[in-house]
Image (spheres, rainbow, N blue to C red):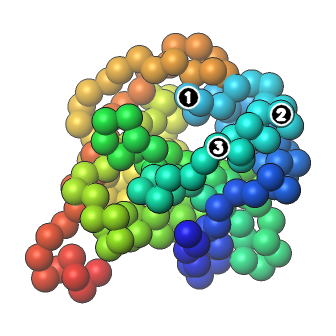
């Protein structure tokens, strides 16, 4: 599964991406805001991630710039009980709207193809930039805070967000 936006190509990860993935996500400032990313992040971690089987109902994408095909992040839907959006952008590319652009593409796919009624997201309580992205994507804070286990920094307080799929004529026009 692929998605194309104005500036980005969202595509599956391939084992050949392991060195670029290691370089892009191997930054303590990125790993500290994610729960499933170890620190330090090594080539073997990237290879193990890229070798995981894909699930059609829970797509994972590498975020690449269309201009030069450089890997700049990752985004996907995971599932424990219900679908959860997760994403990260390499620090050199923060503040350029890439997470929002990629998020819109994944949510459009979730709405039109996967027909997911509800998607949740979590952010580290001290990650205000992620709160802004989630707001732009139509997520609403639930007011619930939980503790999550981060492989990079241990227990972190997280804030839970949800987004309900819109039904009706306005959703079809979007």
Residue 93 % position (x, y)? 71, 57
Q: Secondary structure at mark 3?
A: loop
Image height of 32 relative to 129, above or below: above
Tell which tag, 2 or 3, sits nearer the viewer: 3
> Residue at (64%, 77%) from the top-left corner?
7
Give the residue pinned by disc 2.
44
Residue at mark 2 to residue at mark 3: CA–CA distance:
13 Å
Q: Residues within 10 Å of mark 2 (few under 14, many from 20)?
A: few
Residue 80, quarter of the rendered image: top left
Residue closest to the eye, 37 or 72: 37
> Residue at (59%, 13%) from the top-left corner?
154
- Residue 52's label in the rendered image is 3
The numbered mark, 2 or 3, whose residue comes first in the sequence reads: 2
Residue at mark 1 to residue at mark 3: CA–CA distance:
17 Å
The numbered mark, 1 or 3, whose residue comes first in the sequence reads: 1
Q: Quadrant of the N terminus?
A: bottom right
Image height of 130 relative to 9, above or below: above
Give the residue pinned by disc 1.
35
């Amino acid at each position: 599964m692929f998605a194309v936006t104005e500036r980005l190509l969202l595509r599956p990860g391939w084992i050949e991406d392991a060195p670029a993935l290691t370089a892009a996500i191997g930054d303590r400032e990125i790993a500290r805001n994610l729960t499933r990313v170890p620190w330090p992040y090594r080539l073997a971690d990237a290879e193990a991630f890229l070798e995981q089987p894909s699930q059609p109902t829970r797509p994972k994408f590498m975020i690449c710039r269309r201009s030069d095909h450089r890997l700049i992040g990752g985004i996907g839907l995971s599932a424990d009980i219900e679908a959860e959006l997760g994403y990260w952008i390499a620090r050199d590319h923060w503040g350029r709207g890439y997470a929002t652009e990629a998020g819109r593409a994944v949510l459009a796919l979730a709405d039109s193809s996967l027909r997911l009624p509800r998607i949740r997201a979590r952010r580290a309580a001290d990650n205000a930039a992620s709160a802004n992205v989630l707001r732009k994507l139509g997520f609403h804070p639930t007011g619930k805070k939980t503790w999550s286990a981060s492989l990079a920094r241990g227990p972190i307080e997280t804030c839970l967000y949800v987004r309900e799929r819109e039904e009706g004529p306005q959703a079809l026009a979007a």
